[in-house]
Image (tube, coloured by chain):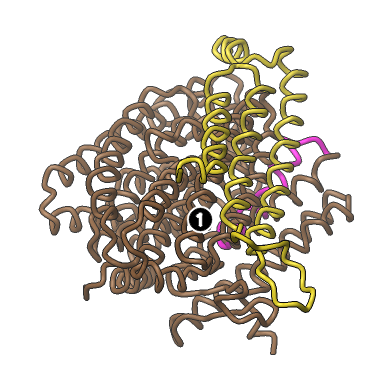
Amino acid sequence: MISAHLPALQVVVPLIAAPLCVILRRGTWTWALALLVSWASLAISVVLLGQVLDDGPLSYAFGGWEPPWGIEYRVDVLNAYVLLIVSVVGAVVLPFARRSVLEEIPESQHSLFYASFLLCLTGLLGVTITGDAFNLFVFLEISSLSSYVLISLGRDRRALHAAFQYLILGTIGATFIVIGIGMLYMATGTLNMADLAARLPFVDESRTVLVSFAFITVGATLKLALFPLHFWLPNAYAYAPSAVTAFLAATATKVGVYILLRFFFTVYSFDFPLKAITLQGMLMPLSVIAVLVASTVAIFERNVKRMLAYSSVAQIGYMILGLSFMSVTGVTAGILHIFNHALMKGGMFLALGCIVLRLGSVELDQLRGVGRRMPLTMFAFVLGGFGLIGIPLTSGFVSKWYLILGAVEGDHWLIAVAMLFSSLLALIYVWRVVEVAYLQAPPEGAKAEEAPLSMLIPTWVLIGANVYFGIETSLSVGVAQTAAELLLDVGLGTSP
Amino acid sequence: MELLGLYNYWIVVVLMMAGFYTVIAFDNLVKKIVGLTIFQTSVFIFYISMAKVSGGTAPILTGEPEVFSNPLPHVLILTAIVVGISTTALGLALIVRIREAYGTIEEDEIQAQDDQQ
């Protein structure tokens, strides 16, 4: 039965398709193959999420080697949800990529572009699905190495410098994680996450385990670009090709958040002495600062892509803030925001990709009157912006609602106020774009030219989903809540 | 004497910090990659050190009951070495492209050119 092997196929299909892309050579064919594979991944992740919701966690023993000796793929509600997010974004960005890549990348590099794209997808899916700590590091490096390549393909030469900086910081982050995993192995003699969780409580409070926790925390926060470790992110997003920015912004940092969740609440699942201090004493203030500082920087940014990149740093702050409440509502808000932010930021970066195609630039001065020249694209951008602000009837409102509920529940009144204030900051930076795009006249002689349908439809799929999940919340909130309850039930040793 | 007995871990820490410092302190991109490689290598030694079982030999089945070193970290590090080499190769390839685009591989000069744009 093929359905028994779905967890393996989820990763293996894009992995095998990547070298096929290089062999095929022709840009159109490789694109068609990549598209097919990304849709197959989406189908697999939908089936997996359905199975997990119905029957509980799935375990897949690679090569028939039983865990904890062999490598185990373990799918529970949390990673089935993240798998779905990653594969949805991949499946939506690839149709968009065709026109955008034709415009932005030389023809000879197309097959290599799609091969790297599929490798990046493989890596992100692999990090999410694996139940083995070292395997997680390997997939993390697959996704990172391919994303450095993807970013360096940007037209601007600054893309090269941005990719190099990301390479240095990303490698340091991943190496920190592998040091932490090594120390865990040293203390317990196992690499399987479930097995680690079972054994760690019996290891005496050793310094090795404490240090491993510190290394993994810092490594993961570097990867997910939590303030003040976010310096690689704005340039990498700003100068990468449009399709790459949309894909990475919606998936890469989210998978980083997933790593943090997985280690904090599954691996160090017992009442680990450092966890509460780290979450509430370190990550909570840092994420509040991230939200406020990055939103403020975004207000002063002239390049709209960089502006959205800083806004991403702020939104990552929301996710980590949710986790740091250590309550079901808080963690639900964090997981929910992974999903909602992927939809709105992915959609907004796709809209910017449409604008780049027609105008060649996203500097704020160039966008004068673009609301009249490209009404559909710009309207999608504005709806996404409403999500960032948290206006009701967009998905951003739903995650903010749960976040503020979590803050109030935990008696963090100041933080709730800071959240409301940060919405104001978001309003200002979205408004700056709206003002230029709608209230200023387009330059003389500029033609009204909407983006092609192959790019508009993917943009609207994500933005439409952003509105849909702002109204119909039972699916997104329901799954996030189940995942949060599952994590905290085990993760704090107390019933929610 | 325990401090001396753990000498390979001391080497790990010294290499790790030397590599990390090189990445942070130097503007030359090639030197940064060198530092990064040393940093990663220290982790390899760390894994190999922890696999050592005192009195154990190489983990090859000879039929006689013997004490073996733990072979798993060796295998893990084989994978990590491949990752490290790919990172170095990609980093150096990027440096070549940066040199073509900017005419320099000093980070402060690249930054200055970026700021002008």
The chain to which mark 1 is attached is A
User: Which residue is at a point 26% across and 57% down the rendered structure image?
Assistant: A273
| Quadrant hosting residue B33 | top right
Residue situated in front as seen by the camera: A459 or A182: A182
In the rendered image of this protein, does residue A195 appear above or below residue A326?
below
Q: Pick whichever, B18 or A72, lies toward us.
A: B18
Mark 1, Cα crowd under 10 Å, few <14 / some 14-19 / many 20+, is: many
| A102 magenta-colored | yes
Q: Is residue B81 visible?
A: yes
- Relative placement, left or right, of A279 versus A365 is left
Q: Total number of numbered labels?
A: 1
- Which residue is rendered at x = 23% and y = 55% of the image? A325
Q: Residue beneath label 1, please? A: A181
Identify by letter the chain in brown.
A
Is residue A104 magenta-colored?
A: yes
SS category of the residue bearing label 1: helix
In percent of width and height, residue B93 lies at 76, 31
- Which amino acid, by three-letter code, is at mark 1? Ile
Q: Is A136 placed left or right of A254 in the picture?
A: right
Foreground: A349 or A70? A70
Q: Which chain is yellow?
A: B
Q: Quadrant of the C terminus of chain A?
A: bottom left
What are the residue bounds of the magenta stretch? A87-107
Answer whether residue A473 is visible to the viewer in this image. Answer: no
